Structures are given as structure tokens and as C-alpha cells.
Amino acid sequence: MPLPDERGYFGSFGGRYVPETLMPALEELTAAYQEARRDPSFWQELEYYLQQYVGRPSPLYFARRLSEYCRGARIYLKREDLNHTGAHKINNTIGQILLARRMGKKRIIAETGAGQHGVATATAAALFGMECAVYMGEEDMARQALNVFRMRILGATVVGVTAGSRTLKDAMNEAMRDWVTNVDTTYYLIGSVAGPHPYPVMVRDFQRVIGVETRRQVQEQTGRLPDVIVACVGGGSNAMGIFHPFLEDREVKLVGVEAAGCGLETGKHAATLNRGRPGILHGSKSYVLQDEDGQINLAHSISAGLDYPGVGPEHSYLKETGRVVYTAVTDGEALEAFQLLCRTEGIIPALESAHALAQAVRMAGEMPQDAIIVVNLSGRGDKDVQTVARALGGEG
Amino acid sequence: MKGNRITQRFSALAQEGKKGLITYITAGDPDLDTTARLVETMIEAGADLVEVGIPFSDPVADGPVIQQASARALANGVRVKDIIRMCAGIRQKSTGVPLILMTYYNPVFQYGLENFARDAARAGVDGLIVPDLPFEESEELLGHTDRYGLALIPLVAPTTTEKRLAAMAPAVRGFVYCVSVTGVTGAREEIHTDLAKFMQKVRRHIQLPCAIGFGIAGPAQAAAVAPYCDAMVVGSAIVDLVARAGTGDPAPAVASLVREIKCAIEKCA
């Protein structure tokens, strides 16, 4: 049976848990997406922008020096960091902007944690001449000043959120409030495979291009499918994008990597699938970090992009079915992997992606030399260099 | 549903030809003793039904006033089970006034749907409002609330289509909460929605009483809204008075606002 079902459920996860004001808008969006999905001209237009503007396909790069360092499996990097604006987020924003335009919407809102989705949204809005407001927690604005500046240059309004933890969770609350208020004119461009139906399936469909390309590229370069694919999971869109075209290939092991922050036992982490339990947050039923009363816990990660107490519902489903294994990597391990990639390959990865890299390095040493690991290098690390410098005591 | 206090209260109001006043307060802001006292104050001042909010960490349907009240209550460590116990205490003192709990779905889900319905009903709670639970997702909870005689009260919005109203009509219990604006809770200077048209649309599909809420700041707006509904909900304006009182006693200000609004809708002035 194709997932999700018509109510937006992946097994027992997903659905639509939003104020009634938004339900007609979600119905409208679902209908518009179903219609666009069946329209070849929609995909042709998307493909045009992905090739000519985003720069797809992104390379699948054999990281020879990194692999030699690990003394084990061959590690390949899917270079989403080379996309225009520096991350996988642009695949989805171009897709959704084209849809918003079909729906006749003139104003776009978004929420952002690390700022990559905000920059990608501001970029796509500029490209199509739409008004754009991006909600961002003030804590994240401080951590990601470079991306705040980029969004403003691109013509977007960045709205600082002072409520709660001042991070992605609160930015998402504020974006939903804006949408409830301006639902007639406004398109809410969600950046991950989270939120109410149809966002999880729609964002996954727009990010599948990562996995589709990887599949072709790895076969061209090695003559076979990889043994392992590793991707980081905050909300989970880059992971869903690269995993999805491999779900039926049982011989390919899929590993999602969450942020263990200061350590899973410290309570200061963002490892929703490892340490959370099913609940309802931001419009869908999925794993959530929460207390006994169902109050949402604060997440912690050195990476603003992973610092989220929820996760996309399809990941919850893939966890429960056992198809994907979800591990966690600490701030310290991610920082080590960050430096390792810089020095062995001359690539500065996003801290999000460094979590996936750390897991790959962990696994590679225990695998034979003819084994193949693909790491989704979901974004570049320019935005994170100050965070890394602070963490390393100003030396980097 | 058996002779629920909500149904009885609306029948009594209809017989007297009066409009009902539903007042909202966030439980645990600043503490549960104050909340219990304020509920009694509001009842004495003329509230016909009282809505008690269980705070949630991520209240996406609420504006800043209730959002901040929720944050204060949670910072004070208020727990769901303590709020239900507080309701039982209020019920012992005030027999006739319907009590309604308002909260988001996750606290109810974590408490356990059946446990929540059972414990709330046993505490003397009459109704439940869950703003992030549209009727498509409410079937399971409705099974439990119906079993324990708790009315699961739905919200409808100006954006709600006729098709949706028709589909949800069989699942409406107690009354229907009509959101007067597209937006979040909070007092507003003006309500731009065409209430006459909106309420006509709702009443074409739903025969139960209609309450209007969101944005009613004071007596003048209450009087303006009254002709279109059977009852109205005043929330943020009251919660704001609690916040303004700080460490002082908010009861006098709350009592006087409730009396003024009650007076305005009964045209007693």
C-alpha cells in the first residue's frame, strides 16, 4: 500500500492536528499538490530550475583520503552542499514555490533553525518575486548571524521569535500563528518532512531527487548499490530524500543520525527517535521529546539545524518497522568529524552533516575495504564556522 | 448524551431569552489556589459557563497573552492531574455552573484518552475543547468522552466550508465554538468577520447552541457580538488582568470586568 494513506498516515504516524481555521487550507493544498503531481509540465518546470538554477545533479564524490584514514569501507559523499545556497533545502523550496505560484499565492512564510531553509525560501521567493517573511528564534539568530544577513539581502523579512526556547520549535509555533491569521493570502513553506499532511509527503517527494541521483551515480561509479547510506536527522528531510528511493532495497542498510548533544544520558540532546515517545507536535503524530504531561522538552544540539524536539512522521514509521536504524552522535563527535573532513578532503561540512559523517567514520573502520558507505553531505559549513571556533576555543 | 450541565444551562438561558457568558482562565497562573478562587469569583460575578485552560508548552492557536500565561503556569510546575483535582474542588462548591477544560491534544494523549475522559468527568468537568484536534482526528477521543458524559466541543472558523460543517455536525457535542476571526486568541479592537453571514452558515448545519469567541475585549464588543450567538467567550481580556495584577490580588478587577460584560449583553445598563 502506498504511504501515506489518504489521511496522511504512515502507519500510526502523521495526520493533521491543527486549528480548524487551517483545515480548509490544508485540503486546498492537498488538492493542488495532487493535481500538480500528476501534471508532467509541473515536474518539467521543477527539473529546469533544479538543473539550471540549483545546479543539479550534485556530484557523488569518492572521499579517498577520508576512506584511507578510516581504513575500511569506501566513503562516498553526496554533495548537496554544492547546491545553490549551500544545502539540500533549496530542492524543496523551489518545488513548493512553484506550487504556491500555481495556487495564486503572493506571500510566503517559513520558519528556520540554522537558517538554511530560511535562505533557500528567501532565495526562491526572490526568484519568483514573492513577499517573504521568515520566523527564526532569537537564539538561532545569534548563532546564525550570517544566514540572517543573507535572508535580509535577499529581500526577506526576518522575524525574531522571543518565546520559549527561542529556537526552531518556537519559530514553527510563530509561523503557524501567522498562517492561522493570514491563511487566505499566505503560503506556509515548511522546510522539513514534518507538519500536518500533506507536508511530510510533499517535502519527501521534492527531496527524493537526492536518492534518485545517488542510486544512478553509485551504480555508474561502482557497478552496484551501496551497503550503507547515512544521513543526519533533525526534522529529517535530507535523510528522507536520500533514503526513500532505497526503501525496497533490503540489502542497503539505512542509518539516520540524531544529535546526542551533550550525551543521551544528560537530557541535553535532540535525539527524538532515540529518547522520545509518540505524541503530537506541530500538526502531526510522531516521536516527540516530552515530559510525562506531554509538555514539549527543549532540545539541545551544537547544530541549530538539528535542535528540534520533533521529527517527521515517516521516520517514526521507519523506526517502528525497523527499516531504518536511528543512532545518535554527540556535539564532540560531530566537531571531530567536522575537522576531519576539512583536513582530509578540503570540504567544510555543515555541523548537521558532520553528525552523519561521524557515524560513517564509526562504521567504516569495522567494514571490509570493498564495502561502500554513502554519506549525505546535506549542507556546507560556512554558516557554522563561528560556532565551531567558539567550541574549539577560538582556534578552529 | 445525558442531561449534561452544559445542555441544561443553554436551555435555561434560552428560556429566559438571555445570552450566556463563558469566561476563560489559564490554570496555574500564577498558582492553582488563585485559579480556583478566580473561577469562583467569575461565577459569583455572573459567568454562565467557565473554561479552564490546561497550559501547553506550544500553544499554536493562542496569542501572546494566553501563551505567556501558559508559560508562567508551566514555570510554576503546574500538572494536569492537579488541575483536574482543582476542578473537583470547584465542583463541590459551585454545583450548577458548567466547567469546561481547554487544552491541546498532546497533554490529553499523554494522560491517556480514556483516563482523561474518566478523570475529568469524575471531577465534575462537563466539557472539553481541544483546538488542535479537528473532527477528522477526533473519533477515538469522542468515543471515550461520550462514554463518560463529557462534551467534546468543536471549533469552527470563518474559513470552515459548508462541506466541512455538514461532515462535522454529527460529532458536535454541547455547543459549537465559533472562532470570530481567522487568527489566534487575543483581544482585538475590531472584529472584521461578517458575523451574520458566518453564523447563518454554521446554523444551517448545526442545531446546537453557538458560542462566539476570540477577540472579545470588553463590554462594547460583547454587546455587538451578542445578537449573533447564544453565548460568548471572553478569555485573553481576563487573563491579561491576572497578568497585570502581578503579585497583587486580581479578583476585584476580574469580577468587575465579568460583571460589566454580563451587564452589557443583558442590556441591564
Image (cartoon, coloured by chain):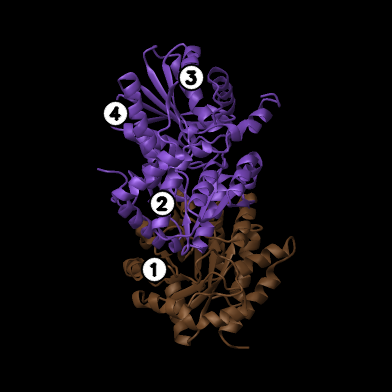
Chain colours: A purple, B brown
Three-letter amino acid code at the position of disc 4: Asp
| Residue A323 at x, y percent in the picture | 34, 31
| Nearer mark to the viewer, of 1 and 3 | 3
Three-letter amino acid code at the position of disc 1: Arg
Q: CA distance from mark 2 to mark 1?
A: 41 Å
Q: Which residue is mark 2?
A: A98
Residue at 51% from the left image edge and 63% from the top image edge:
A182
Residue at 68% from the left image edge and 62% from the top image edge:
B243
| Nearer mark to the viewer, of 3 and 2 | 2
Q: Which residue is mark 1?
A: B173
Q: How many marks?
A: 4
Q: CA distance from mark 4 to mark 2?
A: 31 Å
In the rendered image, residues at marks 3 and 2 fall on the same chain: yes
In the rendered image, residues at marks 4 and 3 fall on the same chain: yes
Res B178 seen here: yes
- Residues at marks 4 and 1 touching, judged by CB atoms closer than 8 Å: no
Q: CA distance from mark 1 to mark 3?
A: 57 Å
Residue at 43% from the left image edge and 79% from the top image edge:
B197
| Nearer mark to the viewer, of 4 and 1 | 4
Viewer-nearest residue: B54 or A376: A376
Number of residues whose C-alpha sits closer than 10 Å to that of mark 4, classed few (under 14), some (14–19) or many (20 or more): few
Q: Quadrant of the N terminus of chain B?
A: bottom left
Label 4's element? loop
Q: Which mark is residue A249?
A: 4
